[in-house]
């Protein structure tokens, strides 16, 4: 496993964590994530020493840590710009729900990024 690569690619998640707090509206956020996933999959396919799926999965796990922490810490600002997310947390303390949803989304998107990376490894020529 190339942990340096995983950590470096996860910084896109850190950037998105802060960008989604107040800059990027939730309606166009998926487009940003798609570009990030395609780029990460390409880099993993080029640089990773194998285990492409696992590399992609772990990038998303680190992403979920960054995102959950940033959104939890800046909760008021985040929900002011993402009212649909605020509506999801009715009845349970919002930060507690973020602690549940964050890792769940991290695993779900980890599978997706892992599949992207695996597919890219079949298409992209390895860096020699």
Image (cartoon, helix red, strand yellow):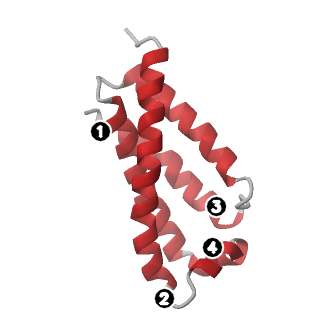
Q: Residue 25: where, in percent of width, then height?
A: 74, 61
Q: Residue 99: where, in percent of width, then height?
A: 41, 73
Query: How many numbered callouts?
Result: 4
Tell me the residue at 74%/58% (across/down).
Answer: 27
Near-viewer residue (92 or 64): 92
Tell me the residue at 53%/91% (across/down).
Answer: 91
* Secondary element at image label 2: loop
Report whether 81 appears left or right of 73.
right
Q: Which mark is residue 20?
A: 3
Distance, label 4 to label 3, CA atoms, is: 12 Å
Q: Nearer the viewer, mark 2 or mark 1?
A: 2
Q: Considering only order in the chain, which callout, 1 or 2, is on the residue closer to the N terminus?
A: 1
Q: Which mark is residue 3?
A: 1
Q: Residue 97: where, in percent of width, then height?
A: 46, 78
Residue sitting at the far top: 128
Tell me the residue at 56%/52% (across/down).
Answer: 15
């Amino acid at each position: 496993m190339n942990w340096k690569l995983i950590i470096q690619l996860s910084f896109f998640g850190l950037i998105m964590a802060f960008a989604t707090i107040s800059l990027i509206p939730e309606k166009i956020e998926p487009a940003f994530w798609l570009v990030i996933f395609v780029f990460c999959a390409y880099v993993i396919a080029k640089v990773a020493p194998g285990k492409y799926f696992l590399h992609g999965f772990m990038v998303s796990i680190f992403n979920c840590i960054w995102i959950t922490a940033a959104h939890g810490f800046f909760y008021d600002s985040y929900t002011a710009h993402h009212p649909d997310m605020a509506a999801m947390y009715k009845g349970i303390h919002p930060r507690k729900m973020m602690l549940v949803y964050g890792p769940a989304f991290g695993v779900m998107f980890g599978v997706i990024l892992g599949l992207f990376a695996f597919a890219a490894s079949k298409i992209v020529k390895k860096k020699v």
